[in-house]
C-alpha cells in the first residue's frame, strides 16, 4: 500500500484556510506542515473528525481548535460573542467541519479521485487530545495560525487496491439498514472481547444519542465507513477504569493511567470489531469500506453528530465498568 499524504493533504489545507477567510473573515497562515509530532500540538477543546473512503484509498482527517481560537471564529461566523462553547456553538463546529471537507472533496473529485466522506462528528471535552491511529506512522500534522491563536489539522491516508466482490454487482439490490446490522456489531464486540481479552461483555438496551451528551467517556476509537447506500461512523468509547481493565487483559500489565503508550488499543479494538462485523455484512451484500481509525482522549468527552438522525448507542458492561458502541448513518450523498 502506498502513502498518499502529500498528494491529498493540500486540498484539505486549502479548504480549511479558505473557509476561515471566507466564512469567518479572518486571515490565517500556514505555520507548520510535517510529520506527526505530539510536541507541536497542544490539548484542544473541540474537534471535528471525518473518515474518507474510496476504491483507491482510505484516510482520516481531524480539525481541532483550542477554546480561544474557536470562540473567535464562531464570533465572526455567527456575529455574536460567547465566553464558553455552548451546544449551539458545537453545531457551528459541525457546520465548519462539513464545509471544509466538502470543499476538499469537490477539489479531489474534479481531479479524478472519486471518494466518499463518512459522517463528520464533533468531539468535546476537557484536555481533549485527538490522534490518528499510531499504526499509520506517516501521519501529518498541520498548524494554521490566526491572530486569535492556532488550529490544527491531522491527516493520514493510504492507497488501497480494492478486491473485486461479487456482492457489489451493480445489478444487485443494496440491502437495507435494519436490526440485523446492529446485531452483527453486537456479536462482533462480544466475540472480539472474548477472543482478544477473555472477557464476557454484556450488552444493554440501545438508545439514541439525541443531545450528543447522553454519556461521557475518557478514551475511544472511531472510524468512518461507507456501505454503498449509506455513509456513517462507528466508534467504541470507554470509561477510564473500563479501558484500563481491558488493557490489563490485552497486554498483561496493569496501567494506572491512560497514556500515549496504551491509547492505541482503542483504535485497534475498533479495527478488530469492525473487521469481524464487516465480514458478516459483506457476505450479505453491503460491500462496506472503512476509513482510518482515529483516537480521542480527554475528560468528560462526548460526541456530537450533524447527522439527519440521532446516533444509535449500544451500551456494554465489562472489565468492571461501562463502554459504548455508537453508530451514525445517513443516505449516501454523492
Image (cartoon, helix red, strand yellow):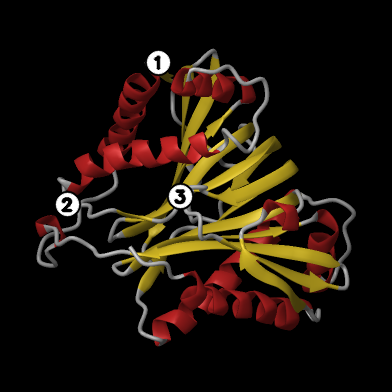
Q: Neighbour class for label 2 at 10 Å: few (<14), some, many (≥20)?
A: many
Q: How many angstroms separate mark 1 from mark 2 (CA)?
A: 31 Å
Q: Which residue is mark 1?
A: 199
Crowding at dot 1, Cα within 10 Å, few <14 / some 14-19 / many 20+, comes out as: some
Q: Residue at x 36, y 29 (%)?
A: 189
Q: Earlier in the sequence, mark 1 or mark 2?
A: 1
| Quadrant placement of the C terminus | bottom left
SS at mark 3 in the image: strand
Q: Position of residue 245 (x, y in %)?
A: 54, 18
In terms of depth relative to the viewer, which is nearer, 147 or 26? Answer: 147
- Residue 84 visible in rendering: yes
Please say if the residues under marks 1 and 2 sit with CB atoms less than 8 Å apart.
no
Q: Which mark is residue 285?
A: 2
- Choose mark 3 or mark 2, whichever is in front: 3
Between 129 and 1, the one lying in front of the other is: 1
Residue where numbered disc 3 is placed = 223
Amino acid at each position: 500500500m502506498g502513502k498518499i499524504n502529500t498528494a491529498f493533504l493540500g486540498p484539505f489545507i486549502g479548504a480549511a484556510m479558505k473557509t476561515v477567510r471566507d466564512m469567518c473573515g479572518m486571515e490565517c497562515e500556514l505555520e507548520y506542515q510535517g510529520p506527526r509530532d505530539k510536541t507541536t500540538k497542544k490539548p484542544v477543546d473541540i474537534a471535528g473528525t471525518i473518515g474518507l473512503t474510496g476504491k483507491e484509498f482510505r484516510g482520516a482527517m481531524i480539525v481541532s481548535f483550542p477554546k480561544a481560537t474557536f470562540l473567535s471564529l464562531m464570533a465572526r461566523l455567527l456575529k455574536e460573542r460567547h465566553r464558553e462553547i455552548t451546544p449551539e456553538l458545537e453545531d457551528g463546529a459541525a457546520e465548519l467541519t462539513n464545509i471544509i471537507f466538502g470543499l476538499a472533496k469537490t477539489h479531489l473529485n474534479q481531479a479524478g479521485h472519486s471518494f466518499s466522506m463518512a459522517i463528520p462528528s464533533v468531539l468535546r471535552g476537557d484536555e481533549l487530545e485527538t490522534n490518528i491511529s499510531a499504526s499509520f506512522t506517516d501521519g501529518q500534522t498541520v498548524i494554521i495560525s490566526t491572530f486569535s491563536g492556532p488550529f490544527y489539522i491531522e491527516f493520514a491516508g493510504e492507497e488501497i487496491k480494492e478486491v473485486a466482490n461479487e456482492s457489489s454487482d451493480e445489478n444487485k439490490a443494496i440491502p437495507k439498514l435494519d436490526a440485523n446490522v446492529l446485531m452483527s456489531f453486537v456479536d462482533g464486540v462480544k466475540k472480539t472481547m472474548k477472543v482478544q481479552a477473555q472477557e464476557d461483555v454484556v450488552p444493554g438496551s440501545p438508545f439514541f444519542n439525541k443531545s450528543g451528551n447522553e454519556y461521557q467517556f475518557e478514551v475511544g476509537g472511531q472510524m468512518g465507513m461507507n456501505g454503498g447506500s449509506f455513509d456513517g461512523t462507528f466508534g467504541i468509547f470507554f470509561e477510564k477504569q473500563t479501558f484500563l481493565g481491558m488493557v490489563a487483559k490485552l497486554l498483561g500489565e496493569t496501567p494506572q493511567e491512560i497514556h500515549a503508550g496504551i491509547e492505541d488499543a482503542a483504535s485497534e479494538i475498533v479495527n478488530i470489531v469492525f473487521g469481524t462485523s464487516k465480514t458478516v455484512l459483506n457476505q450479505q451484500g453491503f460491500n462496506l469500506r472503512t476509513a482510518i481509525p482515529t483516537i480521542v482522549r480527554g475528560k468528560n468527552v462526548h460526541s456530537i453528530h450533524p447527522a439527519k438522525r440521532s446516533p444509535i448507542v449500544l451500551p456494554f458492561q465489562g472489565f468492571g465498568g461501562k463502554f459504548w458502541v455508537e453508530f451514525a448513518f445517513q443516505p449516501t450523498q454523492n
